[in-house]
Image: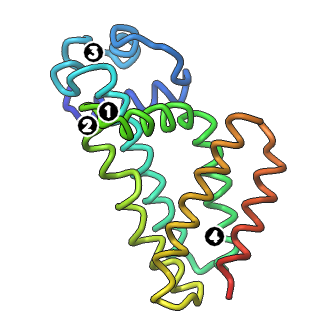
Amino acid sequence: MSRESLLDGAVEHFAKNGIGDASLRSIAASIGTSHRMLIYHFGSREGLLAEVVRTVEAQQRDLLAMLSEKDLPLAEQAEQFWRLVTEAALIYGPLFFELSAHAMQDLPHTEALKADLINVWLPPLIDLCIRAGLPPDEAPAYARLGLAASRGLLFDLLLTGDRAGVDAASDLLNKLFTP
């Protein structure tokens, strides 16, 4: 199996089974490979998990790009994106936040992930802010605020389970981006 097909299998495995404390052997068995192949391609369980987070983050950026191409009002794009991201966060969020903490500690398995947590999100979000009518010189700050606040709301959701509360806060956040 190729590295990409192993990664796709791992993402699918976690989507079906959650993250939990699955061992590399149980993940390998679930996706039809050996733990040695996973070690060869990802270095460790933590390396595989970091790549799963990078993949899910890339899928979310692709979703943002796809919604941006649709001829929908910006508020509707934002609502659809938030709904889909919160669903993914219920599955992958604990792993995302755990590995984000690893990245803050400069753990080796998160080197590539660390580069993807903020910087790759900013250009599409800046573009979105400009399309929303925000001044181009303020768009980078708004993009960073939106990313940080959204992740904070996802953290809130995972800790409290208060979907209605975080959805209401997300709606309010979106109003900040409408000049």
Q: Earlier in the sequence, mark 1 or mark 3?
A: 1
Which residue is at a point 84% across and 49% down the rendered structure image? 164
Q: Given contact means CB atoms under 8 Å apart, are the residues at marks 4 and 3 in contact? A: no
Mark 3 neighbour density, 10 Å: few (under 14) some (14–19) many (20 or more): some
Q: Given contact means CB atoms under 8 Å apart, are the residues at marks 2 and 4 in contact? A: no
Which residue has dot 2 on it? 4
Horizontal and vertical percent position of residue 139? 50, 81
Secondary element at tag 3? loop
Which residue has dot 3 on it? 33
Q: Is residue 116 left or right of residue 88?
A: left
Q: How far separated are the C-alphas under marks 1 and 4?
A: 29 Å
Tell me if residue 59 comes above or below residue 77 in the rendering.
Answer: above
Which residue has dot 4 on it? 77
Looking at the image, can residue 18 be seen? yes
Which residue is at a point 19% across and 18% down the rendered structure image? 37
Mark 4 neighbour density, 10 Å: few (under 14) some (14–19) many (20 or more): some
Q: What amino acid is at disc 3?
A: Thr
Tell me if residue 178 comes above or below residue 80 in the rendering.
Answer: below
Q: Given contact means CB atoms under 8 Å apart, are the residues at marks 1 and 2 in contact? A: yes
Q: Earlier in the sequence, mark 3 or mark 2?
A: 2
Looking at the image, can residue 8 be seen? no
Secondary element at tag 1? helix
Q: Earlier in the sequence, mark 1 or mark 4?
A: 1
Check the picture and name the quadrant holding the C terminus.
bottom right
Q: What amino acid is at disc 1?
A: Leu
